[in-house]
Amino acid sequence: MLCTLRPNFRGRSSQLGASIVGIVLFLFATTAGKAQTLTPLYEFQGGADGGSPNGVLMDSAKNLYGTTIVGGQTIFGTVYKLSPAGVKTILYNFTGAADGGEPHGTLVRDARGNLYGTTEYGGNLNAQCAGMQGCGVVFKISPSGHETVLHRFTGKADGGQPLAGLTIDRKGNLYGTTGGGGTGGCNYWAVGCGVVFKIDTAQRYRVLYRFAGGTDGGVPETHLSLDSSGNIYGSTTGVGAGDQGTIFKVDSSGHETVLLTFTGTNGSQPYGSLALDARGNLYGSTYGGGNLNDCNPGFGCGIVFQLKPDGQEPILNVFTGGSGGWGPVAGVLRSKGNIYGTAALGGQGTDCCGVVFEVTSSGVETVLHTFTDGADGGSPDTDLIQDSNGSLYGGALGGTYGYGVIFKIAP
């Protein structure tokens, strides 16, 4: 069985441009994997158990928390807790009504143990987005499993259909994006190009920026990164000057600056979240771009990049579609100077089944695990996290039952 991507990533490929000026290319190579062990921590069975897991977060006791896009007591997804022993407890079942439905992205957690996230649909059932009732919600789940809806989107000026999780600052303010609503018109949405929003500790919702769908970009699908000065960093996918996505910054006053426009050989379609270091460098990956002769002709296999504060973009790795994988759709994790992430395709073959990779600062890629679409799953498409021992955790599709896997890779 060939591994496939989640529906959110299907059909979003656009023709890429053919040239870019002033990119610094690193020498890159793919090496054989290190001694790594992948353990499936939990395999979802669909139905009441849930399916299609998003990424996970970890507490101090090494419990994992996450969401499933579908399944539960209804078909609208769940919030769950997974103990270190692999025991799963469903904390909340979405109904698709006023409480929301189909959660996306990784949860965030406050000091009191409350969990926060978003759903793509449900909420205000008088609003319609993409032909579905409701345009999504921002939710809070207490440790006891009680849900509070912090905002119900209308699909209009306040945005609609959040496709990513939230970011929380030290004060407890929440930041996020919506893929639609706001203003402008974009290729993939009937109305609006998306917004950047904030919910403060008093639960007041405010739009910080509305994308117009021009050179400023549009259709953000990833969670945001924050620096110590309160600046917000993120990416947009299929629009911008080259119609292939952008990296942006929004300051505390709501002013947006486009830091990078993707045009093809410097990358295309940045679906994954960004990593930010103490020097202000951003790191990320793109689904397409790079060598446009590889994978689909004119499309490319994707890249891993660094974006410096001066605007230079060293490309750390260009995927070629072979054993090193291709088509990353999740964000990257930076640890001890190296970049960790997943590619959703390649590894065993052109379309199956993805890899977990490490890329050094000098541009050498090492494959840590090649997915088989067996018990280990396939087409990994969630952000990774890392514990104090250096083990990596993430989610993939497939698995024994076909409804997704949460995995651990130990060094």
Image: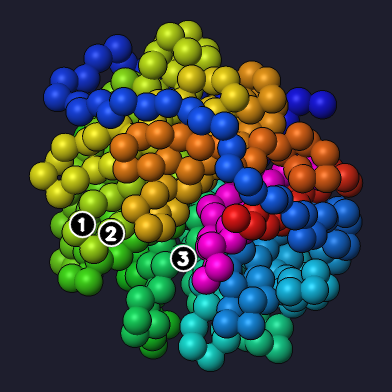
Q: Which residue is mark 3?
A: 166
**Nearer-N-terminus badge (3/2):** 3
Q: Which residue is mark 2?
A: 277
Left or right side of 48 for 234: left
Residues under labels 1 and 3: Cα distance? 21 Å
Q: Which label is found at residue 280? A: 1
- How many numbered marks does the figure carry? 3
Q: Which residues are magenta?
A: 379-399
Do the residues under discs 1 and 2 have CB atoms within 8 angstroms? yes
Residues under labels 1 and 2: Cα distance? 6 Å
**Which quarter of the picture shows residue 24?**
top left
Q: Residue flagged by tag 3: what amino acid is it?
A: Leu
Q: How is the image coloured?
A: rainbow
Left or right side of 148 for 144: right
Residues under labels 3 and 2: Cα distance? 19 Å
**Which quarter of the picture shows residue 363?**
top left
Residue 292 pos. (x, y %): 40, 13
